[in-house]
């Protein structure tokens, strides 16, 4: 008997590098999930091209993404049998309603070793603080920004010659490896 894969929605705002990593993993027969829907708050996000190339349903939401729109989107996701939502570079804050509606079903990847460097400019802040390590963290989304229960972390050594761009590139590689592995574990249990 063929096991049915768990439907996942990925929310993006930009390049879609983590989306691509999640899609690549999902195409393996042994994988427990499939990307069923990609949501973007930017109509020209490169990630939308990746989704369309892989024949994944897409939806563009407004930049404001108000509570009424979030309620409507929640209904759509339930109708599409979405079991998990992955935020992958999604640059919008979700309402309490939306977070509660999908309690413990929304995960985010953040480019720092949380609880350090919540929010933006994480690589710059880590370099300015002369940290020895940076990395990425996957956590459940809660009402407080980048403060939900941590699921997994991956350390990346900060090198003496690092610039923001160089560090960002290495952290992104770590994200691309970690996110699919964590999602696979979450959809197995």
Image (tube, helix red, strand yellow):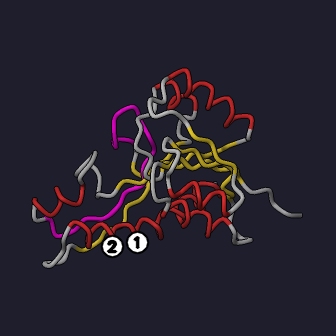
Q: Residue at 62% of width from left, 31% of height from top?
A: 74
Rendered residue at 19%/71% (across/down): 163
Residue indicated by mark 2:
170
Residue placed under numbered mark 1 in the picture: 173
Mark 2, other Cα within 10 Å: few <14 / some 14–19 / many ≥20 = some
- Disc marking residue 19: none
Left/right placement of residue 180 relative to residue 78 reads left
The N terminus, quarter of image: bottom right
Q: In the visual, does 52 lie left or right of 89?
A: right
Residue 134 within the magenta-colored segment of the rendering? yes
The extreme top residue here reads 68
Q: Position of residue 115 (x, y in %)?
A: 27, 49
For the residue pair 186 and 79, the one nearer the viewer reads as 79
Query: Which one is in front, 165 or 98?
Result: 165
Q: Are marks 2 and 1 in contact (CB under 8 Å)?
A: yes
- Residue 17, position as x, y percentages in the image: 48, 64
Q: Secondary structure at mark 2?
A: helix
Can you tell which quarter of the image residue 23 is in? bottom right
**Above or below 53: residue 81:** above
Instruction: Give the CA separation, mark 2 to mark 1.
Output: 5 Å
Residue nearest the observer in this picture, 170 or 138: 170
Residue 35 image-quadrant placement: bottom right
Q: Residue at x 44, y 29 (%)?
A: 64
Residue at 72% over, 58% down: 55
Image quarter in which the C terminus is found: bottom right
Secondary structure under the numbered disc 1 in the rendered image: helix
Magenta-drawn stretch contains 155:
no
Q: x and y percent of residue 176 in the render? A: 47, 67
Q: Which residues are magenta?
A: 131-148
């Amino acid at each position: 008997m063929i096991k049915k894969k768990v439907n996942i929605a990925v929310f993006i705002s930009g390049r879609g590098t983590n989306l691509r990593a999640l899609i690549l993993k999902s195409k393996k027969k042994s994988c427990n999930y499939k990307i069923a829907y990609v949501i973007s708050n930017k109509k020209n996000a490169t990630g939308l091209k990746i989704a369309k190339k892989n024949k994944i349903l897409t939806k563009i939401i407004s930049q404001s993404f108000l509570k009424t729109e979030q309620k409507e989107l929640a209904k759509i996701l339930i109708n599409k049998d979405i079991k998990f939502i992955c935020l992958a570079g999604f640059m919008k804050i979700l309402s309490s309603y939306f977070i509660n509606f999908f309690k413990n079903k929304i995960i985010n990847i953040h480019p720092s070793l949380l609880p350090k460097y919540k929010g933006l400019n994480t690589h710059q802040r880590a370099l300015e603080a002369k940290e020895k390590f940076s990395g990425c963290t996957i956590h459940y989304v809660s009402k407080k920004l980048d403060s939900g229960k941590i699921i997994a972390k991956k350390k990346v050594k900060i090198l003496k010659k690092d610039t923001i761009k160089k560090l960002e590139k290495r952290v992104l590689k770590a994200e691309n490896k970690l996110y699919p592995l964590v999602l696979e574990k979450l959809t197995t249990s």
